Amino acid sequence: MNTDRKAHWAVRQSALPAVVRPCPDCPGTRHRASGRIRVNASGKLLDVWLLLSCAACDRTSKVPVHERVHVSSLEPARLVAYENNDFAVVRELTMSASLATKNGYRLDWSGTWALETRTPLYALDDPTPLTVVVGFELPAPVRVERLLMLGLGLSRGAVRRMVGDGRIRLPLAPDAKAHRDFELTVHGPGSVDAAKHAKPLGAPTEVRTDARSDARTDLGHAESHDAPRPWSRSATA
């Protein structure tokens, strides 16, 4: 495979997910991270909470992170990060699926990501396969079909046709939601057609006796190598 035919897409974080759970003071259900962590000490035992703010009424609520744990059970650097409201730790706790499951709420990832595509303008009709490496900066569940539409600048119908024709090879279904790094391959129509018509090893060779049939076959082969068309893409989700 030509190593020059490689693209890198990145799912970049644009915001933290919203925490969806009922607010005790109003009908609101969406909460945002306040950027703060509270640590309460009782002797050698600690309670640690992630603090949230209701998006509707701004009420502060707490998400238990550690309850009645001995101070020696936490790494000193981790405890300092809690006490200093370290942003990286706030981000980690806010996006934690295990913390959400433990405390009975769900995360809403709407509007939290954008697709960055730093890719040369390769032609999709080039017979040389194009490998696309998709990297995730945050574990947002993104539908694969949506990534393809944004990255390739194509409609949903065009993406589905290319997947159905075998021109886009994926490690998971187009309607699946990905949240981890993966690779896909985009093939030109010529390479896919050749693979479809390739004979299995050891298959008998067909002997043609009609010269006109050969001429028609050669003409069709030549027409399949039209000049490639450049493709555009969107870098914003």
Image (cartoon, rainbow, N blue to C red):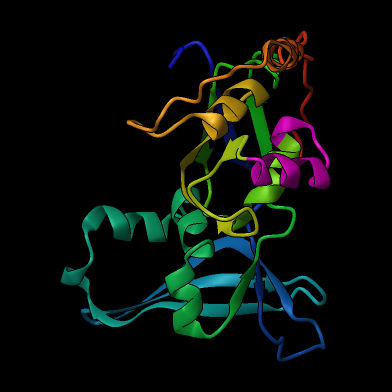
Left or right of residue 50, residue 23 in this image: right
Instruction: Answer whether residue 73 is visible to the viewer in this image.
Output: yes
The N terminus - image quarter: top left
Residue at 72% across / 86% down in the picture?
23
Q: Quadrant of residue 34?
A: bottom right
Q: Which residue does the image show at 30% across and 57% down from the upper left?
A: 78
Is 211 on the left or on the right of 183, as rendered? right
The C terminus, quarter of image: top right
Q: Out of 212 and 112, give the one closest to the viewer.
A: 212
Q: Is residue 14 visible?
A: no
Which contiguous range is marked in magenta?
Answer: 151-165
Identity of the residue furthest to the front in this view: 209
* Image-based side of 57 in relation to 116, left or right: right
Q: Position of residue 90 (x, y in %)?
A: 50, 58
Residue 4 image position (x, y, % from top left):
50, 10
Dominant SS of magenta comes to: helix
Q: Would residue 139 be found to the left or right of residue 118 on screen?
A: left
Residue 157, magenta (yes or no): yes
Q: Nearer the viewer, residue 161 or 214?
A: 214
Q: Where is residue 170 drawn, in percent x and y?
A: 53, 44
Residue 186 spot, x, y in % from top left:
59, 30
Residue at the spot 77% in from the left edge and 21% down from the top edge = 231
Residue 10 is a magenta residue: no
